[in-house]
Amino acid sequence: MEKSGYKIKNTLGMFDLYKGYVMVTMIIAHTYGLFDNIGNNPVTMVILGFTAVIGEAAMPALFVLSGYGFRKTTFKKCLKRQYNTIIIPYIWTVIITSIVHFFGYYLMYGGLKITLKQTIGTFLGGVWGATWIFPVWKFTISPCGDVWFLCALVVASLVFNELLNRFEGKMLFAAVLITSIIGVLLLNIKWLPWALSHGTIAVVFLYLGYVIKKKKIFINITPLQALLVTIPAAGGFLAIIALVGDFNMAYGQYPLGPVSVYFVGVLGCVCIYWFLHLNRFNGKISTCLRSLGRNSLYILLIHSIEIVAVGRYLQYDFVNNWKGNILVACLIQLVVRMIVVFGCTYGYLGIKKRVLAKMDSKINK
C-alpha cells in the first residue's frame, strides 16, 4: 500500500531496494546478444533510453552510497577496514574464479596448454586489478569480472579519507576536483594496477554521497526540486551520448572529461533519490529486491565468478549455435544465469549461517 505524505528517512537498509535493482540489471546487461536483438521499434527505443540513463549511472551511484556512510579515520584504520571488508573477499573471488575457469575451459574446449594460458591471464588480471584487456609477454591480461569495482572502491576510500583529514569546505571540493582531473588523465595508462584511475575518479562520487548525507539533501529536497534536476540531467546525458560519445565507467569513457564525471555522479544521485521514494512499497517484488540489495556484495562476487569463469563462453556458444529465435535464446540464458547466481548466493549464505551457528554452539558449551 502507498502511504500518503511519504517522507524519506535515514534508516538501516534504506538503499537496499536500489542495490537489489542494480544487481538484477547488472546480470541483464551482461547477457550476451540480448540488446542486439531486442528490436528498433519506438517502444524498445524508449526502454533502451531509460535503461541507458539508469544503467550507466549505476556504478557511480554505488560509489555515492559508499560515500553516504563514509566516516573519516586514520589511514591505518581505513586500510584495515578495507582489508577486512573488501580485499579479503576480493582475493577469494580471484582464486575461486581461476580454479573454476581452469576446469570449465578445459571441459568446454580441451587443450591443457591453452587452458593454462587463458586461466593465467585471468588470474593475473585479478591480481593486478585490471580494468582493461592488455598483453603481457605471452599472456592476455583480462579483468576478473565486475570485481574491479572493489579495487576502485579501496583506492577511492583511502584517497578520500586522506582528503577528509586534510581539507574541508571549499578546499575539500577543490581537492576532489583536482583528484578527478588526475584520475581522468590516468585513464590513458591502461596497465595501471588496482583500477587506480577508476578509483581516483570515484573519489568524486564518494564526495557527493558524503555531502548529501552531511547536508541531508535526500531528506530535505522535495520531489519537485528533484524533478527540476532529473529532467535536464537525463536529457543532457542522452544528448551527450548522441553528440559526443558513450559514458561507461568500466571502460573509462567520460566524453567531457572531469565535467562528465560530476555529471554522471549527479545522475547517480538522482536515481538513488527516486528509488528512495519507492521504499513506500512493500510488495513481493520490492521485498525480493531488498533481499538482493542486502546481499549485493555476495551477488557481485558470485556473478563475477560465473561470468568470467564459464558464463561468457557458455553464452557465446549457446546463442551462436541456437537455431530458433535469438531473443528467446537470450532470455533463456538470462533466466538460467539468474537462477545460478542467486541460487549460489543464498546457498552460500545458508551454509555460512549453519557453520557459524555450530561454531557458536561449540563455544557456548
Image (cartoon, rainbow, N blue to C red):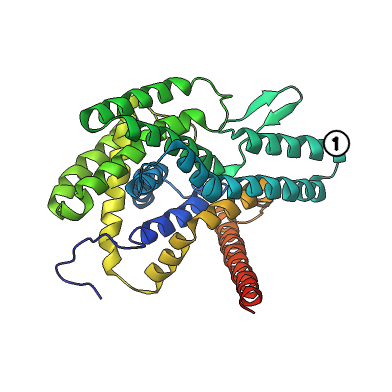
* Image location of residue 334, percent across then percent down: 56, 57
* Vertical order, 220 against 290 (above or below): above
* Image location of residue 190, percent across then percent down: 55, 24
Quadrant in which the C terminus is drawn? bottom right
Q: What residue did someone put label 1 on?
A: 113
For the question of whether residue 238 can be seen, the reply is no
Foreground of the two, 14 or 100: 14
Write the residue at 34% across / 44% down. 53
Write the residue at 61% across / 73% down. 360
Foreground of the two, 38 or 356: 356
Q: Residues within 10 Å of mark 1 (few under 14, many from 20)?
A: few
Write the residue at 29% across / 65% down. 279
Quadrant in which the N terminus is drawn? bottom left
Label 1: state its secondary structure.
helix
* Image location of residue 181, percent across then percent down: 36, 22
Horizontal placement of 365 versus 246: left or right? right
Give the image quarter of residue 177: top left
- Residue at the extreme right: 112
* Image location of residue 362, percent across then percent down: 66, 75
For the question of whether residue 300 can be seen, the reply is yes
> What count of labels does the image hold?
1
Give the image quarter of residue 164: top left
- Residue at the extreme bottom: 365
- Disc 1 residue type? Lys
